Every structure is written in structure tokens, then in C-alpha cells.
């Protein structure tokens, strides 16, 4: 079937030649797609603006040998402009799409697709602080990928919590008996925030103090980069709240 249609989120783009662009998308049904959008950098292009990062599109493509060809694109979620007009939202969204790109293979993941679409929609609508939306996305994306952290029971022994030592390499909070010397300690408020972000409990997350948010963000960034086995270039630019 050389011609196909799907819903997709634009993750990134690269210039090709004088007027074309290579578009990398995470789709609902066809996994990760790399396609050429011909002529989209010309001002007269019919769908150039629809194939920018953070846009959700209904896209029609023609199967090519190495790269598919975009033949049509219609906006489903025009989140790009709203996100790009706010620096905090833009940097958070950049980290989201980079993460989604790294945690999904060519076969993609419907759960990752739906999570990303929901997170970008939330950013565009400014439903929560951008850094909180990002941190929740990172925890949930890693969980879908098979790296769910433990914030209650010991990640090593399963001993019931609460525990205060958090060890990235061991998968979350751990009991004192197995905690390495010098393991970071988290207070109850920070652990509660981390659990809320993982569960999507926004009542708790939105009410968290700035100190807890800052500490949780550091833990999540370290946990994310450990499991991805590489740094997220966009994460260093994310705008965070002022530490208390």
C-alpha cells in the first residue's frame, strides 16, 4: 500500500535542498516516520506551517524507498504557535519531543503518542506550570518504556515505605539497609510530589512548594538521563522556577 494516512506529532525537522524539509514524526499507527515535505520552505507552500515541531497533524504520505513523501497535511492540534510564544513552554516541549524520539523505536508506541499529544496540549493551554508538565511527562514516558521508578516501597527489596534515600541506578527509593553511602535523601514533600507527577495527581502537584519542585526536577532529570544513557540536549535549556 504505497499511499497511507495517519495522525502524527512532528518531533523535529531538517532542511533539505533549497525548499524541502525532512520531517520526523511519531504517528498513532505507523510508528516513527521520516518523510520529505517538498517545497514547504517556500512562502507559497500550502502546508509548511503545519509541519513544524509540536504540531499534531492528519498526514497523508506516499511510501518511498528510504524516505516517505508527504502529500497532504491537515492540522489536528495547532500547538506550535502557542508553545513557541512562551519560553518556558517551548523549552519544556523541546525536551518532551526529544525524549519521545529517544524512547520510541521505528515501530513507535500508541501510549507514548497519546502521552505526548496530551502533554503538548496541556502546555499550549497553560494548564499547569510548564516545568511540572514536563516532569510529569518524563516520569510517565519512562514508565511506559519500562523504567517506572518506585516512590513508596524499596526498589531493591520491596520493603514497605516510606523511605528517604533515592538512588537513580537502583530504580527509586531504597531502604536504609541497601542505600549506598552518601545516597541523596528526599523529604516527604518531595517524594509526595514525585508520586503525584507520576500518577497525574495535579491537585497535589500544583500545590507543591518551590523547594520541592526544584528538588523533584533534579531527581527526574538525573533519572531520565541515566535510563536514556545519554544527555538530553534540550533539558539544559528548560526554564525552572527560582529555588527557595
Image: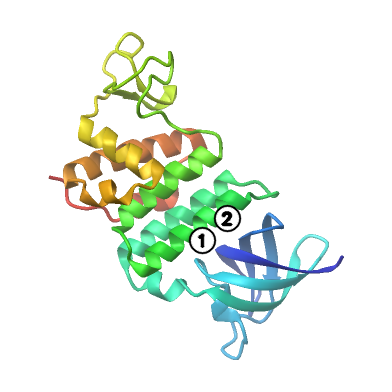
- Which quadrant of the figure contains the C terminus? top left
Residue annotated with mark 2: 113
Which of the 4 image quarters holds residue 12?
Answer: bottom right
Query: What residue appears at the point 21 percent right and 40 percent down from the top-left corner?
Result: 212
Does residue 63 appear anywhere in the picture?
yes
Q: Indicate the position of residue 131 as horizontal and vertical percent values.
A: 31, 53
Q: Indicate the position of residue 155 as horizontal and vertical percent values.
A: 42, 21
Which of the 4 image quarters holds residue 39?
Answer: bottom right
Q: Is residue 53 left or right of residue 23?
A: left
Quick one: label 2, few (<14), some, or many (20+) residues within 10 Å? Answer: many
Of helix, strand and loop, which one carries label 2?
A: helix
Query: What residue appears at the point 43 percent right and 53 percent down from the top-left corner?
Result: 95
Q: From this view, report whether residue 105 is shown above or below residue 121.
A: above
Q: From this view, report whether residue 113 is shown above or below residue 144.
A: below
Front position in the image: 203 or 147: 203
- Which quadrant of the figure contains the N terminus? bottom right
- The answer to whether marks 2 and 1 mark residues whose Cβ atoms lie closer than 8 Å is yes
Residue annotated with mark 1: 117
Quick one: label 1, few (<14), some, or many (20+) residues within 10 Å? Answer: some
Q: Which mark is residue 240?
A: none
Q: Indicate the position of residue 77 as horizontal and vertical percent values.
A: 51, 72
Q: How far, Cα to Cα, is label 2 from label 1?
A: 6 Å
Furthest residue toward left: 244
Q: From this view, report whether residue 27 is shown above or below residue 109.
A: below
Amino acid at each position: 500500500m504505497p499511499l497511507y494516512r495517519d495522525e502524527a506529532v512532528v518531533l523535529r525537522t531538517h532542511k533539505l535542498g533549497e525548499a524541502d524539509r525532512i520531517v520526523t514524526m511519531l504517528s498513532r499507527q505507523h510508528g516513527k516516520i521520516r518523510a520529505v515535505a517538498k517545497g514547504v520552505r517556500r512562502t507559497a507552500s500550502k502546508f509548511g506551517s503545519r509541519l513544524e515541531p509540536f504540531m499534531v497533524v492528519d498526514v497523508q504520505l506516499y511510501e518511498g524507498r528510504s524516505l516517505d513523501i508527504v502529500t497532504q497535511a491537515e492540522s489536528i492540534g495547532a500547538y506550535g504557535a502557542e508553545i513557541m510564544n512562551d519560553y518556558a513552554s517551548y523549552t519544556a516541549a523541546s525536551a518532551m519531543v526529544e525524549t519521545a524520539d529517544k524512547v520510541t523505536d521505528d515501530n513507535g508506541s500508541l501510549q507514548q503518542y497519546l502521552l505526548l499529544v496530551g502533554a503538548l496540549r496541556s502546555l499550549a493551554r497553560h494548564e499547569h506550570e510548564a516545568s511540572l508538565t514536563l516532569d510529569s511527562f518524563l516520569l510517565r514516558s519512562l514508565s511506559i518504556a519500562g523504567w517506572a521508578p518506585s516512590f513508596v516501597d524499596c526498589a531493591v527489596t520491596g520493603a514497605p515505605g516510606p523511605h528517604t534515600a533515592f538512588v537513580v541506578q537502583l530504580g527509586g527509593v531504597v531502604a536504609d539497609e541497601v542505600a549506598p553511602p552518601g545516597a541523596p535523601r528526599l523529604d516527604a514533600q518531595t517524594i509526595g510530589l514525585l508520586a503525584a507527577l507520576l500518577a497525574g495527581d495535579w491537585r497535589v502537584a500544583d500545590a507543591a512548594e518551590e523547594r520541592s519542585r526544584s528538588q523533584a526536577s533534579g531527581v527526574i532529570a538525573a533519572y531520565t538521563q541515566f535510563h536514556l544513557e545519554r544527555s538530553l540536549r534540550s533539558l539544559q535549556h528548560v526554564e525552572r522556577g527560582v529555588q527557595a
